[in-house]
Image: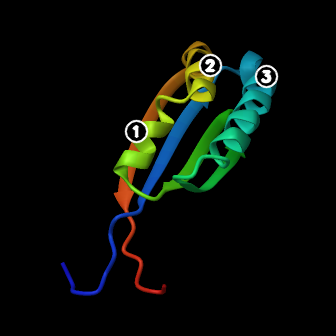
Amino acid sequence: MKEGIDMNELAVAVKLEIKKECIDEFIALASENAANTLKEDGCLYFDIGVNGSTVLFYEVYKSDEAFNEHLNTAHYMEFDPVMKRCALSKEVSKYYIASVNK
């Protein structure tokens, strides 16, 4: 790894295919979950992209630990069953951010 590059921040991309009959409910509850997640000390960014019934969450956390803490919050644990009920598929990718412009 190149010296001077901070790679502690974690980007998480979650791509979901949502049942058409759930899309409105899902987007509303996902937006509420995102707003609550942004209140966490360890969350730096959370955005939701929508293209038809495909939904993409793009989240950035200060560290792996911050992301793991997020997964144990009350608001995530309330949202997770909705995600499981409404999603036809879920793909999660994690990336460490090579922040050279800080």
Q: Position of residue 30 (x, y in %)?
A: 70, 33
According to the image, label 1 marks what residue?
Answer: 68
Residue displayed at 39% across by 67% down: 97
Marks 3, 1: nearer the viewer: 1
Judged from the image, the secondary structure of the residue bearing numbered disc 2 is helix
- Compared with 44, 24 (above or below) is above
39 with respect to 93 (left or right): right
- Inspect the image, locate mark 3, and give the three-letter code of the amino acid beneath it: Glu
| Residue on which the image places disc 2 | 78
Q: In the picture, residue 27 is in which quadrant?
A: top right
What is the secondary structure assignment of the residue under circle 3? helix
Determine the CA span between mark 3 and mark 1: 26 Å
Label located before the other in sequence (1 or 2) = 1
Taking depth in this image into account, of 50 and 59 the one nearest to the observer is 59
The crowd level at tag 1 (other Cα within 10 Å; few <14, some 14-19, many 20+) is: few
> Which residue is pictured at 59% across the width and 45% down the height?
57
Dots 2 and 3: beta carbons under 8 Å? no
> What residue sits right under mark 3 in the picture?
25
Q: Earlier in the sequence, mark 3 or mark 1?
A: 3
Q: Quarter of the image containing the N terminus?
A: bottom left
From the image, state whether disc 2 or disc 3 is nearer to you: 2
